[in-house]
Image: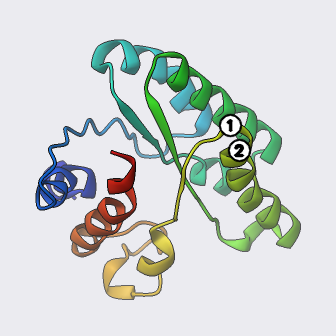
Amino acid sequence: MSIDKAWPTLLPNVIAKTGRALTVVNASVSGDTTGNGLDRLPTLLNTHTPDIVLIELGANDGLRGFSPKLIQDNLRQIIQLVQSRGAKALLMQIHILPNYGKRYTQAFAELYPMLSKQLDVPLLPFFLESVITNPKWMMDDGLHPNEKAQPWIAEFVAKNLIEHL
């Protein structure tokens, strides 16, 4: 899928319908873990000086069976770094498939609301919960939304993001 069809590219036009302006820097990298995001974050913050950072990381950590504590520690550092630069951090809930069992899946899911509460960071709902149930919106891997899902995702994210702008 080309970058111009991805939901982050579509998001400013959706937000514009509400009378607000938004510039989006899509810093996502396919396959990134929370550790990768943390490593790249200082340069991104220096380059773009954002007002808001939407943190949507952790799924790849979960797919690789990384420790929930490691994921939590990385996300905590990401949030604190964003806040230390004067930007507002927004955390998106992530859920994973139950490949590693109920205990791991539950511990993974619970770390997002816990961080949200501890660090007083808004928690946005996970968009894939609605997308994954529609096979026409998913790539063949069953994990990633395809091009057809991107407009819906942009609308969903905008609806949940608008109150934080």
User: Is residue 99 shown above or below 9?
Assistant: below
User: Is residue 131 shown above or below 91?
Assistant: below
Please report the residue visible at 23 percent of the width from the left and 68 percent of the height from the top: 147
Looking at the image, residue 34 sits to the left or right of residue 118; the answer is left
Give the quarter of the figure containing the C terminus. Answer: top left
Of residue 20 and residue 100, the one placed in the foreground of this image is 20
Numbered circle sitting on residue 115: 2
Numbered circle sitting on residue 46: none
What is the x, y in percent for residue 42? Answer: 47, 15
Q: Residue furthest right?
A: 103
Give the quarter of the figure containing the N terminus. Answer: bottom left
Please report the residue visible at 47 percent of the width from the left and 75 percent of the height from the top: 142
Of residue 164 and residue 22, the one placed in the foreground of this image is 164
Would you identify the image quadrant in which residue 154 lies?
Answer: bottom left
Please report the residue visible at 17 percent of the width from the left and 56 percent of the height from the top: 10
Please report the residue visible at 84 percent of the width from the left and 72 percent of the height from the top: 102
Q: Are marks 1 and 2 in contact (CB under 8 Å)?
A: yes
Of residue 137 and residue 26, the one placed in the foreground of this image is 26
Structural crowding at the residue carrying mark 1, measured as other residues with C-alpha within 10 Å and reported as few (<14), some (14–19) or many (≥20): some
Would you identify the image quadrant in which residue 86 lies?
Answer: top left
Amino acid type, label 1: Leu
- Residue tagged 1: 119
User: Is residue 66 shown above or below 77?
Assistant: below
Q: Nearer the viewer, mark 1 or mark 2?
A: 1
Of residue 133 and residue 116, the one placed in the foreground of this image is 116
